[in-house]
Amino acid sequence: MAFLRFLAASTLLLATAFGQGPTALRIEGISGTAVTISPADLAQLPQQTVRMVDHGTSVTFEGVALTDVLAKVKTPTGEEFNPYVASYYLVAEGQDRYKAVFSFAEVDPSFTDRRLYIVTKRDGMPLASKDGPFELIVPGEKRHSRWVRQVKLLRIEPLPTAGAYDSEAARWISASLQDMRSITPGMTRGELLKVFMEEGGISNRHWRRYVYRKCGFIKVDVEFEPAGNPDNQEENPSDRIKTISKPFLEWAIMD
């Protein structure tokens, strides 16, 4: 009998454990950015109250705007992504592996005024264990098929592609090339250092190799026209760029 009681208690304990929701919410953005937030972290974000009808009953949810959660990682927003943002999507996954998919344009404030929410309370009480501690709600839809209970993961991805020019890596390189091309002859060393940073190796006041601040394997060679006394070998932020090479790839130099 003692063994049977132990077995029953163990079974109940396991059932309870497997029924529990996630203790944290993981957000995965683009370019390898990711963060995991707890209910306490969520409480630090601007709080929102959402009044709506759920299955014929008026309810009040409390939580945060999805955009405030996604702001924790890099997203395909801003001018550099304007040609591509509609080809990204957001996946929300629950503890039971249920998934809902949204075009990123559906949640991007630059495209729409619609708001989605990650909520933690219903009618002033913490969400029931079958729903929380986090639930993604989608106001304004006739069916709640894209509501995700016990949501544990939000992931932003580009549409799968075999093209050489529309992958996430290609888009990043395109945006980075525009960034690097903003540095031109006639600009100062100080302006150059906003986009590039110094690398080790042989250099002098008239010539130095620099690496792109966002990727240390992308480099340029820069020739300078010294400002002030040309015999002074100390680099001056006012030195003018005489020539700058096209970006090239090279392993990091350690010295």
Image (tube, grey):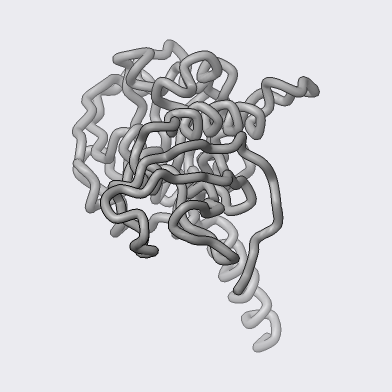
Q: Residue furthest bottom?
A: 2
Q: Position of residue 66 (x, y in %)?
A: 36, 34
In the image, 234 versus 163, the foreground residue is 234
Task: Tell me if 190 is positioned left or right of 167 in this view.
Answer: left
Identify the residue at horizontal 39%, vertical 29% (top origin): 137
Q: What residue appears at the point 30 percent right and 51 percent down from the top-left corner?
A: 237
Q: How many marks?
A: 0
Say whether residue 9 is left or right of residue 178: right
Let me know if residue 128 appears in the view: no
The reply to whether residue 60 is visible in this rendering is yes
Q: Residue furthest right?
A: 162
Residue at (57, 24) in percent of width and height = 88
Residue 197 at what x, y percent from top left?
46, 53
In percent of width and height, residue 121 lies at: 28, 43
Front-lying residue, 249 or 5: 249
Q: Position of residue 202 (x, y in %)?
A: 58, 65
In the depicted structure, whether residue 150 falls above or below residue 164: below
The quarter of the rendered structure image containing the N terminus is bottom right
In the displayed structure, would residue 233 be above or below residue 48? Answer: below
